Image: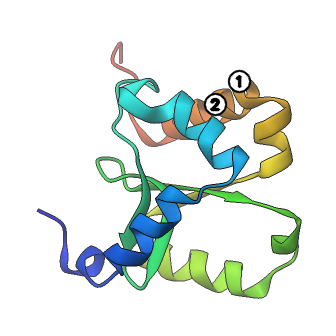
Amino acid sequence: MRSAAVKRGNPNLAGKLRRSGTDAERLFWSKVRNRQVDGLKFRRQMPVGDFIADFCCAELKVIVELDGGQHQGNSSDMRRTEVLERLGFRVVRFWNNDVLGNVEGVIDQLRAEISKMTPHPAR
C-alpha cells in the first residue's frame, strides 16, 4: 500500500504522461523495467506527494528524473527536489541527451548511486 504522501498525486495525469513519454524516457524505461537494475522494481510516472516522478524505486525511495534543456538552472526543480527529499526520497537527475547518447553509462551511474545507499551483500 502506498503512503499518504504518494496517494495525493494525480493518477490520471500520471497515466497520460506514461502514454506520451519522451524518447529518453522510453529508452531509459527499456533498461530499468522488469527488475533489470539490481533486481529493483522501478515504476514510471509515479505520483509522489504533489509531484509525478519520472521513475521511482519505492523500495529504496529513489526517484530518477530525466531532464531536457529547459530544466537547466531551473529553480522550481531545486524546490521540487527539496520537497521530495523531505519526504525521504533520494533524487537522481540525468540529462535526456546523456540517456540518448550513452544509456549504458547512465545505468552505470544509477547503479553507483544505488550502491551508495545499500550495503553490499558480501559485507
Along the line of sight, which residue is nearer the eye, 3 or 20? 20
Q: Position of residue 102 (x, y in %)?
A: 81, 29
Left or right of 122, for residue 2: left
Vertical placement of residue 69 versus 10, above or below: above
Q: Residue at x 43, y 76 (%)?
A: 13
In terms of secondary structure, where does tag 1 sit? helix
Residue denoted by label 2: 107
Q: Tell how many labels.
A: 2
> Helix, strand, or loop for circle 2?
helix
What's the residue type where badge 2 is placed? Ile
For this view, does 14 lie left or right of residue 26?
left
Q: Residue at x 69, y 78 (%)?
A: 77
Q: Residues within 10 Å of mark 2 (few under 14, many from 20)?
A: some
Q: Is residue 91 above or below residue 78?
A: above
**Which quadrant would the C terminus be assigned to in this image?**
top left
**79, 66: nearer the viewer:** 66
| Residue at the spot of label 1 | 104
Can you see residue 11? yes
Across and down, in percent, residue 111 comes to: 56, 31
Q: Which three-letter amino acid code belongs to the residue tagged 1?
A: Glu
- Identified at 87% across, 77% down, the residue is 73
Which residue reaches farthest left? 1
Residues at marks 2 and 1 touching, judged by CB atoms closer than 8 Å: yes
Residue 115: image location, x then y, percent: 50, 32
